[in-house]
Amino acid sequence: MEIIKILIVDDEIEFGSTLAERLELRGFSVKAVSCAEEALTILKSDWLPQLVLLDLMMPGIDGLTTLDLIKKHDPRIQVIILTGHGATESGIIGMKRGLFDYLMKPVDIGELVSKINEACKS
Amino acid sequence: MKNNSSGSSYLLFYGINNKDLSTKERYRCMRNSMLIAMLAITLIPMAIISGINFTQFRKHLQNESYTNTRLSMENARAATNAYMEKTKAAITLVLESHTFEELADQQQFDQIFRQLKEEHPGLVDIGLIASDGIQITYAGPYKLAGKDYNNSLWFHKALTRKIYVSEVFTGFRNIPHFVIATSKKGSTAAPDYWVLRASIDSDTLDHFLASGNTGALEDIFLINDSNKLQSSSRYHGTVLEDFQLRNKPKHDEIVISEEGKNGGFYRAVTRIPYTPWLLVLDHQGYVQRGDWQSFKRGLMLTLISCSLVFGCFILLFSAFIAGKIRESDEMRDALLSETEHNNKLASIGRLAAGVAHEINNPLAIIGEKAGLMQDLIEMDHDFHYREKFIRQLSSLQDAVGRARTITHRLLGFARRMETSLTLVHLNDIIREVFSFLEKEAAYNNIHILLQLQKELPVIRADHGQLQQVVLNVVNNAIDAIHNDMVATDNATEEISNEGEILVTSQCEDNKTVQVIISDTGPGMSADTMKKIFEPFFTTKGNAEKKGTGLGLSISYGIIQKLGGKIEVNSEIGVGTTFIISFPVYSERSENNGNN
């Protein structure tokens, strides 16, 4: 069975790295970056993720723009937004642009894993 | 200035803006001020016009009375003068048409007396007196022949003048009378001068003056310069009594003065030429005139009736206006208060959203770190404190979960998410909520009764949000009744009665749909009622660990967003009632809303 590759894009490095570690413990292959530019670099490399966990509010390129760039790069990559921001309007906009789901921080790891599996199956 | 709030010692107009007064007193003050101002505006001009009218009419009547007095006096003087001239002419004629010898003859003299008496009934007697003062012949009822008048004033005055009229006196006859005496120079056979004297009863003057009296005349009489009445007066006594007269004319002019209280009558005085008399005439003043009295009565009646009618109307009108102003002020205050409350809630919402967002990120880090630690420990079965660490980390995750619940609700309270508006049957929502809470309520000995109006009009709302609103309110009611029962049980150590929640739906005027949720809980104080829609305000306490204080504030936001209204009534010991209203959906209202 192929290992699911996940890219975490979050300016909160502590959060991203810890979550990456937890997901790896659950059998995923995970990389965490802190900005959109780094994420695009990864995407252009050989290591192509099936799913991106994306923060909404980041310095520089924001979450929604990053979503557009990811979808432009490869529309097959599923994206789940993981944010502490409560503006669900952004989630709705994201959905219209191909976002798979919108989750609020802090998220339960079980719920996140089931969403990841769901996204990758679709 | 100090104000006495209990009485009326404060100045009326000052009180309107006086913050020290209670609202009721300020509005009363305003009503009184309006009342006084309007009364002044209407009654003062009316009083001024009435006053001018009163003065002018009185002046007119005064002038009229004055003129009438003068005319009456002129007539009376002319009549008196004519009478005296006629009498004097009769006496003079006798003197001129007879010789001394003829008059000295007693028989002829008696004959002349009888003729004169027929013509002048007031004539008492006549006498012929020689220049030495001895009465030569006498005709009359008294025995006065041979009487000596040498010491009588009238006799000497008659000698020096051609004709003389005396004052009224009693003389030898002892009755009031006056004398008309005329003298004539004698011939060779006669004395140097001789005098014909006629005595006339003063009653003659009374009768004559009385005959000229009219209704407007109060009194008319004669006096002399010594202030003795020369004829009887209606009010001032009989002949020869004293009478004080202030203004006496020096010649034959007519002097008129106002006498009596408030112009009771006019007194005219004039002299009768060639007599020692002054004619006094008292004429009725305007005060006693019927037209003046009826004018005064009419004016007073008009003033009083107009004042009463205007007073009543103004009283009602000022009370009505003050009431309307008060109503409008109260409405404005209520609107301001509601706007202020809404702004306050909106500000709190924005603040809460910001705080929640900032908290969520560190909270996520804590959660993930704790989660990782838990993952690692669970994998290491040899770790000595494994169980203890797992318990501690579970508690930490629970705490993160609780914090997450709070921040998510905070965001839910604040966010302006797009709602999915559909046509909703309120009764369906209530039934769904009832199905969720039925078991929990039954477990707590609480009955939920539904009284749902059939064929309730639909409303346009978000199904889920509306469900959340009803759920929040009914949940609160269950908690309130449950907590109250537990508190009562602890206090009395007995099992308390069952609680009840009544959920009613109804339509008002086909414009509003209402859901009314009443409980038999402990009720709320007025202070609590003011705060229940504020975020984080809770009465559930921490023991239960279930009160975040966001349920009602979120419900409030949802209801506001849907164009509805939530009201609460509560009484301690009786219970609480929430009334949630939504506008009924209609295509027309929808179009208006869109416009």
Image (cartoon, coloured by chain):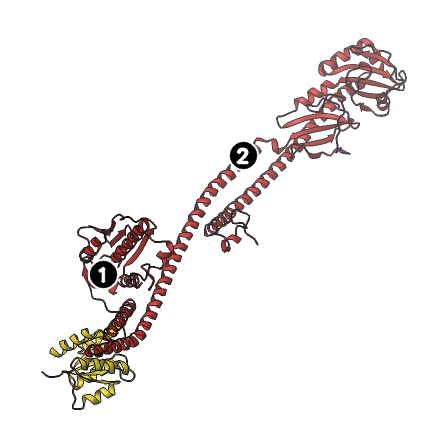
Chain colours: A yellow, B red
Q: Which residue is mark 1?
A: B466
**Regarding mark 2 in the picture, which secondary structure is present there?**
helix
**In the image, which disc is placed on residue A8?**
none
The image quadrant where one finds the C terminus of chain A is bottom left
Horizontal arrangement in the rendering, residue B36 relative to residue B583 (left or right): right
Horizontal arrangement in the rendering, residue B102 relative to residue B286 (left or right): right
Give the quadrant of residue B132.
Answer: top right
Q: Amino acid at mark 2?
A: Arg
In terms of sequence position, does the residue under pointer 2 or pointer 1 come before the other?
2
Q: Nearer the viewer, residue B534 or B194?
A: B534
- The mark total stands at 2
Q: Chain of mark 2?
A: B
Q: Chain of mark 1?
A: B
**Regarding mark 1 in the picture, which secondary structure is present there?**
helix
Residue at figure coordinates x 90%, y 15% from the top left: B189
Magenta stretch, residue numbers: B229-255
Confirm whether residue B311 shows in the render: yes
User: Do the numbered discs 2 and 1 sit on residues whose CB atoms are within 8 Å?
Assistant: no
Q: Nearer the viewer, residue B293 or B315?
A: B315
Give the quadrant of residue A77.
Answer: bottom left
Q: Which residue is mark 2?
A: B297
Q: Position of residue A69 (x, y in %)?
A: 20, 85
Horizontal arrangement in the rendering, residue B320 relative to residue A1 (left or right): right
Q: Position of residue B244 (x, y in %)?
A: 75, 29
Confirm whether residue B430 shows in the render: no
What secondary structure prevails in the magenta region?
loop
Residue found farthest to the bottom: A45
Q: Position of residue B64 (x, y in %)?
A: 62, 35
Q: Nearer the viewer, residue B469 or B104?
A: B469
Mark 2 to mark 1 CA distance (whole Å): 77 Å
